[in-house]
Amino acid sequence: MEYNIQSNQIFKKKCQMPRPDSYDGNGMTLVELMVVMVVSTLLMAAVYAAYLTQHKTSHVQHQVGTMQQDLRAAIDIMERDIRTAGCDPLGTAIAGAGGLAVSTGPASIRVLMDIDESGAILSTTTGIDEDVRYTYSNNAILRNNQINNQIIAQDISNMALNYNTGTGGNINSVDITIQVQTEQIDPDTGNHLTRTLTRRVRCRNIGL
């Protein structure tokens, strides 16, 4: 009988599961696992927030860069024609304002130039633009060569033309001021970002 009792005690000792406090530390407890998950979630949230900020900044910078490039291109095109205004080698093609005709408002100008030295302002069928009009309308700058309107700049919030006259009363220079805005609203300010460029163009053939 004593032998059976001792055998049962030995069997119970062999079958007992080890207690948690007897682990050697190679595993993770539930509390440790939850702490790791919380820290990982916070790190992921911080990384995602940084990504969104960087993406937003990059998008805004891209819009501003495109806007400034379009602004300079529009003024360069206008400057080229205005500088050539009044080109009349034979003195028979242009009369009146000497090559520049101011329209009804400060946001429209007509440019005349005898480029091919024919003694007359050619019709548009020749393929030479000798009669060009610039107009600001519906947030765009239009270049009309008497055949069609070509949009040279969009998202324009304002355009102003200021005419300076010489001693003879003819226009000798034109101040072009164009304000352009981003296509989309800036999420930080809630408004369109704007850039303004002003350039004085000297009329080489008139007002000397």
Image: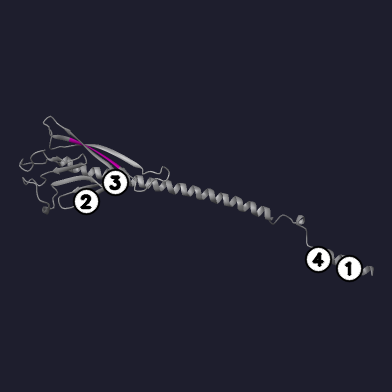
Q: On the rendered image, what quadrant is the C terminus found in?
A: top left
Foreground residue among 148 and 2: 148
Q: Quadrant of residue 69?
A: top left
Which callout, 4 or 3, points at the residue further toward the start of the chain? 4
**Residue on which the image places disc 1:** 7
- State the image coordinates of residue 165 (x, y, percent, origin top left): 15, 32
Q: How is the image coloured?
A: one colour
Q: Residues within 10 Å of mark 4 (few under 14, many from 20)?
A: few
Whole-number angstrom distance, CA of label 1 to CA of label 2: 104 Å
**Residue underneath mark 2:** 150
Q: Quadrant of residue 157?
A: top left
Between the C-alphas of marks 4 and 3, the distance is 83 Å
Kindly indicate whether the residue at mark 2 contacts the one at mark 1 (C-beta within 8 angstroms).
Answer: no
Task: Calculate the distance from the C-alpha at mark 4 to the C-alpha at mark 1.
Answer: 13 Å
The alpha-carbon separation of the residues under discs 2 and 3 comes to 14 Å
First-in-chain label (4 vs 1): 1
Which of label 4 and label 3 is nearer to you?
Answer: 3
Q: Residue 135: x and y, percent?
A: 21, 45
Determine which residue is flagged by label 4.
15
Q: Nearer the viewer, mark 2 or mark 3?
A: 2
**In the image, residue 96 lies in the stretch drawn in magenta:** no
As shown in the figure, which amino acid type bears the numbered disc 2?
Gln
Crowd rating for badge 3 (residues with CA inside 10 Å; few <14, some 14–19, many 20+): some
- Tags 4 and 3 touching, CB below 8 Å: no
Q: Which residues are magenta?
A: 173-179
